[in-house]
Image (cartoon, rainbow, N blue to C red):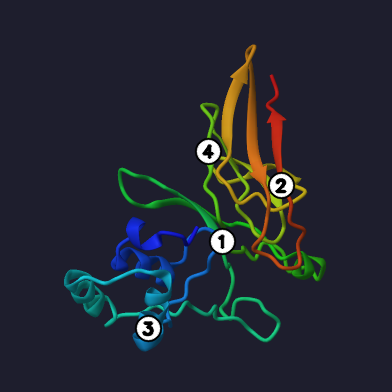
Amino acid sequence: MLVGLGSRLSAAQTIEMIHSGKGRMPPMPDIAGPELEALLRYLGVHASAQDEAEQAGKDRYTFTGYRKFLDPDGYPAIAPPWGTLNAIDLKTGQYLWKIPLGEYPDLAKDDMKNTGTENYGGPIVTAGGVLFIGATVYDRKFHAFDTRTGKLLWEYELPFAGMATPSTYMIDGRQYVVTVSSGGRDPKSPVGGAYIAFALPQ
């Protein structure tokens, strides 16, 4: 992978990869100055005058990540809801409805439900007015809502969090909804991989 790197990538491209990461390699934005120059020499990458000028401009700004604003128990340190699902009228820009999406199982056991959580993944909407979404990090539930009212119609607990936008398809006149269940963002939850498909009622 590193053999001949200097002939495949410019210094600017190599530095961008080091600072931003790629694939399984994490970003390393703090490598700079003499340390970065030594690394480029080791990799056989030679900076041109243009590369050096571009890098000089980039070095003025760095990103060192972010920290979530959490309370001592690891929950968001603001009042819930901590994640919502919203319907917006695109003609007026007004909310039609807004509901909490997701919950923390440990809090739900203590009767603190519908707090909302971080969400990753979008919804799909069927012609019949049903919205399907997983997206919730901690409760691993897949939901169906009425698009007109936001009323929960159905939910199912996935083996892993379903943080992906679902898809729908039809076979022999029967409609199906499929989603990816994998997880990975909640250290307390299992991580794996599965495609889960549901057949809609006829």
Q: Report the side of 186 relative to 85 (left or right).
A: right
Precedes in sequence: disc 1 or disc 4? 1
Between the C-alphas of marks 4 and 2, the distance is 21 Å
The percent position of residue 115, horizontal first and vertical second, equals 64, 66
Circles 3, 2 touching at the beta carbon (< 8 Å):
no
Q: What residue sits 52% from the left and 47% below the top?
A: 122
SS class, disc 2: loop
| Residue at which label 1 appears | 24
Q: Give neighbour class at mark 3: few <14, some 14-19, many 20+ (Cα, 10 Å).
A: some
Which of the numbered marks, if any, corresponds to residue 193?
2
Precedes in sequence: disc 4 or disc 2? 4
The percent position of residue 107, horizontal first and vertical second, equals 75, 70
Between the C-alphas of marks 4 and 3, the distance is 44 Å
Which residue is more in the foreground, 71 or 5?
5
Query: Vertical placement of 102 versus 202: above or below?
Result: below
Q: Amino acid at mark 4?
A: Ile
Precedes in sequence: disc 4 or disc 3? 3
